[in-house]
Image (cartoon, grey):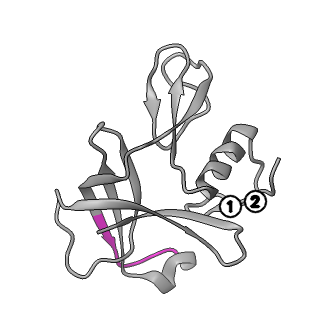
């Protein structure tokens, strides 16, 4: 297995990472966003889940081919936790893909106030040392 990575949204290499989650991080490192799909009932989850919440069956990782979404909802964070205080204020947004799947991420390149229904594009970032991986929305 490749070197363990960490994800900006609260996950780090300090914690136990399952093989399922490690695979998800490895795909993310390749700029591939993965959803999970229940092998029994076909329910899809984004972000992915290892087990289906409906029937507890194993889920498999499947690539999300969509890269564009519409802004479904957002919040402007003025009082951030200490770890994100240098970025405040910032926008956390829920983007809805045409398939109906929704993904929460920061919008990082706003030049004006966000508007529900505006177009979003999925973007990926890595820290210079390659150990931190993020996904974000771009306008």
108 magenta-colored: no
Classify mark 1: helix, strand or loop. Answer: strand
Location of residue 62 in the rendering, given as x and y in whole percent from the top left corner: 53, 34
Coordinates of residue 106 in the picture (x, y in percent): 40, 66
User: Start and end of the magenta stretch?
Assistant: 75-81
Of residue 126 and residue 91, the one placed in the foreground of this image is 126
Residue 52's x, y, as percent? 54, 24
> What is the crowding at mark 1: few (fewer than 14 residues within 10 Å), some, or many (at least 20)?
many
Image quarter (top left, top right, bottom left or bottom right) of the C terminus: bottom left
Left/right placement of residue 56 relative to residue 115 reads: right
Q: Disc 2, disc 1: CB below 8 Å?
A: yes
Residue at left offset 62%, top offset 22%? 58
> Which mark is drawn over residue 40?
none
Q: Is residue 130 above or below residue 101?
A: below
Badge 2 local density, few (<14 within 10 Å), some, or many (20+)? Answer: some
Question: How far apart are the two marked residues, 2 and 1, measured between alpha carbons?
Answer: 5 Å
- First in sequence, mark 2 or 1: give its number: 1
Above or below for 52 versus 99 = above
Residue visible at 64% across and 74% down in the picture:
127
Judging by the rendered image, the residue that carries numbered circle 1 is: 6
Residue 68 percent coordinates (x, y): 31, 53
Q: Is residue 79 magenta?
A: yes
> Vertical placement of 75 versus 46: above or below?
below
Q: How many marks?
A: 2
Is residue 8 in sight in this rendering? no
Residue under circle 2? 13
Extreme residue toward the bottom, this view:
86
Image-based side of 99 in relation to 117, left or right: right
Q: Residue at x 16, y 65 (%)?
A: 115
């Amino acid at each position: 297995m490749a070197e363990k990575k960490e994800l900006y949204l609260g996950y780090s290499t300090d914690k136990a990472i399952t093989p399922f989650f490690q695979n998800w991080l490895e795909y993310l490192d390749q700029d591939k966003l993965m959803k999970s799909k229940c092998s029994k009932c076909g329910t899809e989850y984004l972000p992915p889940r290892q087990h289906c919440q409906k029937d507890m069956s194993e889920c498999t990782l499947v690539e999300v081919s969509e890269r564009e979404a519409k802004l479904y909802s957002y919040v402007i964070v003025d009082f951030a936790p200490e770890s994100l205080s240098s970025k405040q204020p910032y926008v956390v947004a829920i983007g809805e893909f045409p398939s109906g799947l929704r993904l929460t991420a920061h919008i990082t390149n706003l030049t004006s106030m966000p508007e529900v229904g505006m177009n979003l594009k999925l973007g990926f970032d890595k820290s210079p040392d390659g150990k931190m991986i993020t996904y974000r929305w771009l306008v």
